């Protein structure tokens, strides 16, 4: 599409994954005239495009699908609703107005809108961010990169890699390896148990892949290609594992580089935008949905959340959601708490798309989840006995009696 058409839209959505596409369809059905979805990738559909395995689509389309088929269905569904889906368009700046600056093949453009929805998703934490030592040979990649190479380019980046991590995405990496006959030589988890729920630990063993719990990758060795990894167990003993690659999986972070130079507030816990229960950012013309709010949930969760936040956007244009005034602002006590979403609770009745607090831990913890208001009053939110990356859900209505202002959420351990 030529740049001269990119002048104004009713709604601009940044990110063509499940959340962005489902929101676009709902906005069209709510009567919005011009809804534009922008994505920097050459094809729309988001991460499911790379996931050549089940299960996708049961709740959304009533059938079990692999990721690429699910992505194609989402894109077709969106275009059939009259949404403009523009790929190869990289948004480079978020401005007040709102106005977006974007880079396209034919130059730099800008587009204004009545509302903007951010749904740029997540990325995995890299080797460098995990401070893994050793040399820097080729063959160290994320699960997303692996899936792109295997499913989009039919490439086989290695034959005998090590998989670091045991989140759900780590098991997706195992399935992707099987697709081209790649056989991992070990699955490594620093914690004493798998991050994914207990039955998941059976899967690598069924494939004959050693699952090493309580083990860290200390060093990666190799000159041009990975030749071995050195691991350290909790006992202090080390082991050298011959391998030709490392899949660094999980520990998702929001794809939020755009926020860093913008006027929007960033939540230090999630790394994504600070939002209220309507998905509304600190600039009320901007909203956010999907995994950039809560790294990470399933495609189906993001799809439904995109629809719900789209309703809030349409309602905001009609003046039907409360103004962001007199709000309760939530912060967390870090370690063991990792984040809470939403971080701002606006007073008012009615259904909100983020009508439940989603809280996660940075390490296993047990105790009472307690909110302490600025005046010192405490509210018990829940009892917790949980692991990292497992969601803790608390209905917002439990905060109804808490006054506006600052409040802090913490875990009183062992009580």
Image (cartoon, helix red, strand yellow):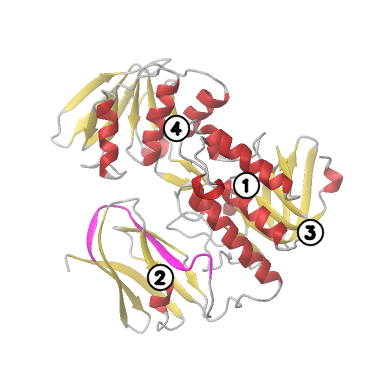
Q: Residue at x 63, y 49 (%)?
A: 21
Place of residue 42 in the rendered image (x, y in percent of width and height, measured from the top left): 67, 33
* Residue displayed at 41% across by 35% down: 128
Residue hosting label 2: 395
Range drawn in magenta = 352-367
**Local secondary structure at mark 1:** loop
Residue 175 vertical placement versus 294 (above, below): above
Q: Earlier in the sequence, mark 1 or mark 3?
A: 1
Tell me which label, 1 or 4, sits earlier in the chain: 1
Report x, y in % for residue 49: 56, 35
Q: CA distance from mark 4 to mark 3?
A: 39 Å
In the figure, residue 12 lies in which quadrant? bottom right
Q: Are marks 2 and 3 in contact (CB under 8 Å)?
A: no
Residue 67 left/right relative to 411: right
Q: Which x, y percent locates residue 89? A: 71, 41
Q: Earlier in the sequence, mark 2 or mark 4?
A: 4
Real-space Cα distance between discs 2 and 4?
Answer: 35 Å
| Residue underneath mark 1 | 15
In terms of secondary structure, where does tag 2 sit? strand
Q: Are marks 1 and 4 in contact (CB under 8 Å)?
A: no
Sequence order check: which comes first, mark 4 or mark 3? 3
Report the residue marked by disc 4. Answer: 142
Q: CA distance from mark 1 to mark 3?
A: 19 Å
Q: Which mark is residue 33?
A: 3
Specify whether 331 is left or right of 216: right
Above or below for 162 versus 295: above
Please report contact status of discs 1 and 3: CB closer than 8 Å, yes or no: no
The answer to if 187 sits in the magenta stretch is no
């Amino acid at each position: 599409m030529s740049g001269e058409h990119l002048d104004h839209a009713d709604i601009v959505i940044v990110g063509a994954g499940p959340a962005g596409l489902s929101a676009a369809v709902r906005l069209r059905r709510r009567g919005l005239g011009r809804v534009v979805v922008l994505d920097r990738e050459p094809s729309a559909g988001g991460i499911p495009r790379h996931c050549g395995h089940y299960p996708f689509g049961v709740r959304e389309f009533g059938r079990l699908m692999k990721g690429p088929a699910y992505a194609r269905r989402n894109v077709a569904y969106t275009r059939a609703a009259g949404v403009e889906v523009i790929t190869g368009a990289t948004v480079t700046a978020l401005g007040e107005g709102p106005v977006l600056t974007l880079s396209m093949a034919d130059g730099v453009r800008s587009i204004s809108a009545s509302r903007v929805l951010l749904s740029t998703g997540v990325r995995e934490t890299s080797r460098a961010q995990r401070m893994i030592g050793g040399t820097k040979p080729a063959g160290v990649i994320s699960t997303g990169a692996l899936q792109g190479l295997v499913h989009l380019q039919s490439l086989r980046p290695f034959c005998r890699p090590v998989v670091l991590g045991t989140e759900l995405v780590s098991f997706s990496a195992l399935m992707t390896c099987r697709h081209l006959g790649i056989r991992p030589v070990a699955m490594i988890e620093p914690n004493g148990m798998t991050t994914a729920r207990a039955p998941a630990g059976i899967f690598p063993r069924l494939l004959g892949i050693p699952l090493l719990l309580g083990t860290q990758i200390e060093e990666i060795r190799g000159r041009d290609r990975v030749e071995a990894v050195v691991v350290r167990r909790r006992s202090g003993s080390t082991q050298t594992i011959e391998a030709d690659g490392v899949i660094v999986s999980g520990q998702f972070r929001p794809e939020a580089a755009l926020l860093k130079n913008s006027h929007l507030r960033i939540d230090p816990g999630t790394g994504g935008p600070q939002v209220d229960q309507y998905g509304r950012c600190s600039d009320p013309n901007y909203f956010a949905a999907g995994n950039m709010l809560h790294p990470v949930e399933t495609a189906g969760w993001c799809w439904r959340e995109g629809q719900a936040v789209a309703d809030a956007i349409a309602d905001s244009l009609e003046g039907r959601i409360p103004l962001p005034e007199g709000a309760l602002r939530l912060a967390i006590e870090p370690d063991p708490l990792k984040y809470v979403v939403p971080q701002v609770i606006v007073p008012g009745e009615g259904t909100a798309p983020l009508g439940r607090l989603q809280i996660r831990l940075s390490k296993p913890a047990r105790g009472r989840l307690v909110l302490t208001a600025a005046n010192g009053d405490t509210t018990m939110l829940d009892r917790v006995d949980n692991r990292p990356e497992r969601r803790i859900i608390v209905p917002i209505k439990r905060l109804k009696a808490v006054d506006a202002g600052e409040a802090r959420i913490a875990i009183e351990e062992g009580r």
